[in-house]
Image: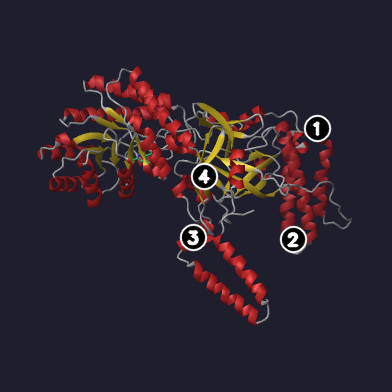
Amino acid sequence: MERRSKSTSWSIEDSAELYGIREWGHTYFDISAKGEVVVNLKDGKKTKPVSLAQIVKGARDRGTQLPLLIRFGDLLRWRIDELNEGFHNAIREGKYQGAYRGVYPIKVNQQQEVIDEITRYGRKYHYGLEAGSKPELIAALAYMHDPEAYIVCNGYKDEEFIDLALNAQKMGIQVILVLEMPSELELILDRSKKMGVRPTLGVRFRLSTESAGYWSGSGGDASVFGLNISQLMRVVDHLRDQGMLDCLRMLHYHQGSQIPNIRAIRQAVTEATRVYCGLVQEGARMGILDLGGGLAISYDGFKGATSASSNYGTKEYCADVIEAISEVTAEAGVPHPDIITESGRAVVAYYSVLVINILDVNRFEPAQGKVELGKDAPPLLLNLAELQEERRKDGKLSRERVQEIYNDAVYYRDKLRTEFNYGKVCLRDRSKGEEVYWDIMNWISTKLESVGHDGSQMERLSSVLTDYYYGNFSVFQSLPDLWAIDQIFPVMPIHRLKEKPTRNAVLSDITCDSDGKIARFAHSNAICDSLPLHDPEIGSGEDYMLGIFLVGAYQETLGDLHNLLGDTNVVSVSIENGKLKYRREQEGDSVAEVLSYCEYNPKELADRFRVLAESAVVSKRITPSERKEIMGAYEAGLRGYTYFET
Ligand SMILES: *Cc1c(COP(=O)(O)O)cnc(C)c1O
């Protein structure tokens, strides 16, 4: 512990500010006086902070290794409360006549625990489910038995999907079949006639309102889903002809996910409510307006309208929605509809945290002290050494001079490399040149603050002068959106937060793909290309652990098996009478499992390897007992975790 009290001027408050935990962490995550990240969990009627490091220790004592995905049912329940109570309050305050009946879109996190909580805990709100495919509907019908909640069926539907929905409706469940395209109508009407059920229909409408999120393409004119206005009118006419306009109950739209700007949300609600009122005036029965998803959370902790951010909270969202719908319906003289939203991200993102350990570090460390140059050193090396000498005049150098030194150093270094390629400079001299060069760059980087920088190349120095920390995880498996769409997730150490971070690092995963890294972080109130971290003290016997937060939405099942790294270990954690409870422990994929997904047969792999081992015995390269040992290790490898094991 001694070694950790070096910097006395650093406190947990400094860490909280640096990493922004109180901003992106909502009220769920914070830092304890011990300098550890805590999650607030429910213990009976009280809320208690629980250290993540403590949770990890307990899991490890039980034989569960890192990387570990930890799920918190309490956080999921709080999010369900926040959304539903947000609407209930806004409805009360706005004297709104309709009800709120949210549905949870299964695709955002399909885990059984999530569906179980939504249907069991959410029952008091008549919280329903959104199914976008046949398998999702099949899962939904096993859990959702509340006759007052809705199941909204989006996505393309075959006969089997439609029949299942209509049969569920026969049994008293409110299943709404949403038309995504005009051609679905005939099939639905045909099946309902055959089954003697009047379907509950919704239509998905393509709004013209543009929205400003990463996913804005999934709503609006460019969307592949939904009916445009003339298709919508044709559906109305067709239903009227069939005497079935009373079956049209719901208007649905989906603006896209993570809409960071409340103004865009308001615009869309306003347009959709106008369309809704028009449908009522056309004689459709209606009664329900479904606003889809899009409720954003702040991943970077900022309150801006950029894609990782959100310039509003749940409370404001609910109030604005109620207000916008009230305004438009009042003007049109149409009764208030019941409101459905399909918020997924905002409900489940907080629910899981990935904890990883740092395996190794590639440190940016220019040679300490002077590089010895002989009299016969190449002139280019001597030039570089002269630049290095200017360090003595440190305080007196102008910005211009620093820039010149930078330019010259880059020039000499590049020239040295060229001459090496022509065989004019030897390997050792080239190495010396690089060392002097990096020493100069490191020195200049410390001067950037005082001399100021103006967006020149010199400014990019700080990103070159960072360490690489190798984390025990795969971006492709655990954070697919980080790779696919440059999503930002909060990353920070889960312990040692009383200590000042002394290094700047980029985080690399253990795939051998150059995309397998985290190099954009939100900290110190900006998006930065490195993250301040502590010296991980590799080899000290104690792991340096980072948490990657807000990974509950979309990350778990979009992940892939790049480099054959499989699912991580998973555990759900709660507390009871101050004691940690570990439930639903799931071992991550073993090597054999991952290989069998790619159609290898683990037994055959071992057989084939044994052939190699036996021929080595025959040719006397190894002894029979060595063969036994080697085979044992191979088979243990097959049974083991795909990540780094300690
Ligand atoms: C994905 C999706 C959602 C969920 O959106 P969030 O932004 O996660 O709330 C809701 N509705 C539909 C139709 C979707 O495709």
> Real-space Cα distance between discs 2 and 1?
35 Å
Report the residue marked by disc 3: 593
Crowdedness of circle 1 by 10 Å Cα count: few (<14), some, many (20+)? few
The answer to whether mark 4 and mark 1 are in CB contact below 8 A is no
| Quadrant in the picture for residue 124 | top left
- Residue 343: x and y in percent read 38, 35
- In front of the other: 69 or 361: 69
The answer to whether mark 3 and mark 4 are in CB contact below 8 A is no
Circle 3 sits in a helix, a strand or a loop, which is it? helix
Of callouts 4 and 1, the N-terminal one? 1
| Quadrant in the picture for residue 172 | top left
Report the residue marked by disc 1: 395
> Real-space Cα distance between discs 4 and 1?
55 Å
Q: What's the amino acid at mark 3?
A: Glu
Circle 4 sits in a helix, a strand or a loop, which is it? strand
Q: Residue at x 56, y 51 (%)?
A: 516
